[in-house]
Image (spheres, rainbow, N blue to C red):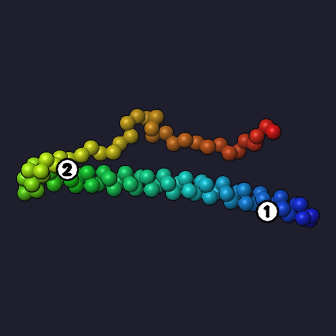
Amino acid sequence: MSALQILLIAAGIALVGAFGYLAWLAEKKRREALAARRFYNANIREMSRLCRTVPTNLIARAFGFEGGEYFELGSEAERVVPRVDLSRTSDR
């Protein structure tokens, strides 16, 4: 096996590793965003509960606190996860 063949194999392994890392990173970021949305919505739920129950609702009214809106995606287009197709090679 020549040095060039070894170099090409190593470059191919590195490229596959880089794509794997990018896929892992994209999934990690998706999960972090989902966790942040759940955290936010849990806090809104708790704040809304406190604004409705005695005695905390008396304090909430005095200072103008209200329950908030849950974070939800507005349309179906926002829910679609973009797909990346890396299987095609360039035409060069």
Q: Is residue 65 among what the camera can see?
A: yes
Q: Position of residue 64 (x, y in %)?
A: 13, 47
Which residue type does callout 1 highlight? Ala
Look at the numbered disc 1 and give the secondary structure of its residue: helix
Q: Residue at x 61, y 43 (%)?
A: 84
Q: Which residue is mark 2?
A: 48
Q: Which residue is mark 1?
A: 10
Question: Split into 4 quadrants, where in the image is the N terminus?
Answer: bottom right
Q: Is residue 28 left or right of residue 43?
A: right
Q: Residue furthest front?
A: 63
Q: For label 1, count other residues whose C-alpha is less than 10 Å away and answer few (under 14), some (14-19) or many (20+).
A: few
Look at the numbered disc 2 and give the secondary structure of its residue: helix
Q: Is residue 57 among what the camera can see?
A: no
> Which of the two discs, 2 and 1, labels the residue nearer the N terminus?
1
Q: Residue at x 75, y 42 (%)?
A: 89
Mark number displayed over residue 41: none
Q: For label 2, count other residues whose C-alpha is less than 10 Å away and answer few (under 14), some (14-19) or many (20+).
A: some
Q: Position of residue 80 (x, y in %)?
A: 49, 39
Distance in Å between CA atoms under marks 2 and 1: 57 Å
Q: Residue at x 43, y 35 (%)?
A: 76
Q: Residue at x 79, y 37 (%)?
A: 91
Q: Quadrant of residue 16?
A: bottom right
